[in-house]
Image: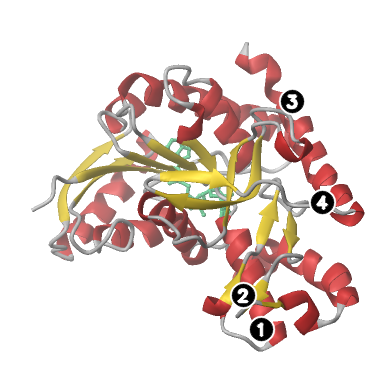
Amino acid sequence: MKTPVRVAVTGAAGQIGYAILFRIANGDLLGKDQPVILHLLDLPVAQKALNGVIMELKDCAFPLLAGVVPSDDPNVAFKDIDIAILIGSRPRGPGMERRDLLAANAEIFKVQGKALNDFAKRTVKVLVVGNPANTNAYIAMKSAPDLPKSAFTAMLRLDHNRAVSMLAEKAGVEVADIEKVAVWGNHSPTMYADYRFAAVGGESLAAKINDETWYRETYLSAVGKRGAAIIEARGLSSAASAANAAIDHVRDWVLGTNGKWVSMGIPSDGSYGVPEDVMFGVPVVCEGGVYKRVEGLPVDEFSKGRIQHTLNELLEEREAVASLLS
Ligand code: NAX
């Protein structure tokens, strides 16, 4: 039997938590032969609900679930962990300004970044899901100077999956056959779902769809506003699809993508005109537990404008939290 991998999930008593934990324990994250120990962090006020979730996890008798460590303290929850999926964050309250929301979350991710720095395994892989995901991941990274920057990522995978699914529907092709879709920038309606390189069986998807007006005027905003459309329809924000995207992101990072492009928010190395360290969605391929940015892609005028637009938003967010990091 393999040594269990320790996976921390924060916001474990929330709705994405409820959708993700059972799948991790069932082997969807790391494979059907890999035992896991779940480290579950939530606020003191949520411990009773968390206990109920743990009772249900036990009632599933998952053969791969080798243990559960519940806590309301990041220093306990992050001890010796291999993977951290940071979902819990402060939602926007009535009358709360965007700046206040950024500040409240900055405080949370500063504390959690430091706890990761002090207690997680040196090889830890961190995915931030809680919004504003890119900036929260940036803060956690900046608060963990002893860990490599590459340990920190933000979730763009839900946007990526939505982008691929809508293209498949329009082109009348299978999702699995689509390659080389890229989502750039912030996990927000400003992100840029780029289909210029997308292909099916070697054939350009843009040429197959042959409707640039649809792409620019309908598709891009539909992908960007999909989260709002789900809230409107369901009365609740995306949970199962967000959990699924988090699993896709971490699984691909750990187990590899076999050359396939996926989108991840990663600290910029300065390429594509994005200042260093900004947590920016880019196309990557993963191999051997490492993600690698797809480099050297041409950027046309339209894409340049879209990338700058989403970058400007991230730079504003960075500015809004700068004083908290000093
Ligand atoms: P819920 O409100 O259902 O659950 C959040 C949980 O986090 C609660 O149990 C709460 O007690 C806990 N929590 C709050 N602060 C915490 C802290 N400091 N430490 C530990 N736990 C804490 O929200 P849910 O629907 O699960 O969404 C969670 C987050 O995911 C939100 O920020 C949401 O905006 C974000 N999302 C991000 C997505 C992405 O693609 N990056 C998509 C889905 C989702 O909207």
Nearest the camera: 298 or 183?
298
- Please give the label number shown on residue 320: 3
Q: Earlier in the sequence, mark 2 or mark 4?
A: 2
Which residue lies under the disc numbered 1? 169
Compared to residue 5, the image places residue 103 above or below, namely above
Q: Within 8 Å of ligand 1, the CB of disc 1?
A: no
Q: Disc number at residue 299?
A: 4
Of the two numbered discs 1 and 3 on the same chain, state the one appearing first in sequence. 1
Report the amino acid beneath label 2: Ser
Q: Position of residue 166 (x, y in %)?
A: 67, 76
Residue, disc 2: 165
- Name the spot of residue 171 as percent of width and height, x first: 70, 85
SS under mark 2: helix
Residue 97 shows up from this direction: no
Q: Quadrant of residue 43?
A: top left
Task: Estimate the spatial distance between the alpha carbons at disc 4 and disc 3, rounded to whole Å.
Answer: 29 Å
Mark 4 nearby-residue class (10 Å; few <14, some 14–19, many ≥20): few
Pointer 2 and pointer 1: residues touching (CB < 8 Å)? yes
Gap in angstroms between the C-alphas marked 2 and 4: 24 Å
CA distance for labels 1 and 3: 39 Å
Label 3 environment density (alpha carbons within 10 Å; few <14, some 14–19, many ≥20)? some
Location of residue 86 in the rendering, given as x and y in whole percent from the top left corner: 45, 41
Q: Nearer the viewer, mark 3 or mark 2?
A: 2
